[in-house]
Image (spheres, helix red, strand yellow):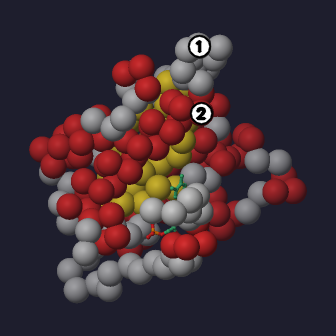
Amino acid sequence: MSIYRQRRSLKPLDMDPNREVPRETLLSLLEDAHWAPTHGLTQPWRFHVFQAPESRAALADQLQAIYDEIIPAEARDEAKREKLGKVLRHAPLVIALAAKVEPGGKIPEWEEIAATSCAAQNLMLSAHEQGIGSYWSTPPVTCSAEFGQWLGLDETHRVLGLLYLGYLPEGAKEPRSTRAPLETRVVWHGEA
Ligand SMILES: Cc1cc2nc3c(=O)[nH]c(=O)nc-3n(C[C@H](O)[C@H](O)[C@H](O)COP(=O)(O)O)c2cc1C
């Protein structure tokens, strides 16, 4: 079966917290991501890497602080806030994903976000090829302007959540997923 069909999202808490992704492997994943298609060759993807335990702890603290700042009291969910802190400390590698956009520019914003999503898929498929699981997670705080600012990004960037990367623990069950029948998503115009 092709890697496109084999790749599954691996929840961060199901990753082995003690097995690091080697730097050389990480660089090869980023390089594969960097070869995604891009209109006008703008290469809008930006990857902010958090691998060292201290940097992931700082990221967790910051995202919880942003949660406290931007989520209104009536929408607060203490369990969600706690889980965010826990998963960021557990998963061995976290990449905050952002797209550089040019408001009013030649390439529309949606195309830069689409190109960055292509890069994310390259990265996740490349990780799968290397036996590394991945998970794209987009709770609102991870896509907030406040988070972008903390990353040092100005208003011409859109933060698009977090990519978690890590290995499945030895002997653990592979994650599974399903899809609706393909014909529900395809419309054929004319005869072949
Ligand atoms: C842009 C994007 C954002 C996602 N955000 C979340 C998320 O916030 N929470 C979550 O549980 N899964 C998220 N996912 C992962 C999906 O849940 C997952 O891809 C889906 O369940 C299908 O499983 P599979 O990837 O194993 O095929 C996201 C996926 C994409 C492409």
- Say whether disc 2 or disc 1 marks the residue closer to the N-terminus: 1
- Please tell me which residue lies in front, 34 or 152: 34
Tell me the amino acid under the disc marked 1: Gly
Q: Could you say where residue 124 lies in the image, as x and y percent from the top left?
A: 33, 55
**CB of mark 1 near ligand 1 (< 8 Å):** no
Q: Is residue 68 above or below residue 44?
A: below
Instruction: Name the secondary structure under disc 2.
Output: helix
**Residue most toward the right?**
74
Q: Could you say where residue 68 lies in the image, as x and y percent from the top left?
A: 71, 46
Q: Which residue is mark 2?
A: 110
**Residue most toward the front?**
191
Q: Which mark is residue 15?
A: none
Q: Residue at x 51, y 39 (%)?
A: 114
Q: Could you say where residue 55 lies in the image, as x and y percent from the top left?
A: 37, 42
Q: Which residue is mark 1?
A: 105
Q: Are marks 2 and 1 in contact (CB under 8 Å)?
A: no
Q: Is residue 15 visible?
A: no
Q: Residue at x 70, y 63 (%)?
A: 78
Q: Can you tell which quarter of the image residue 116 is in?
A: top left
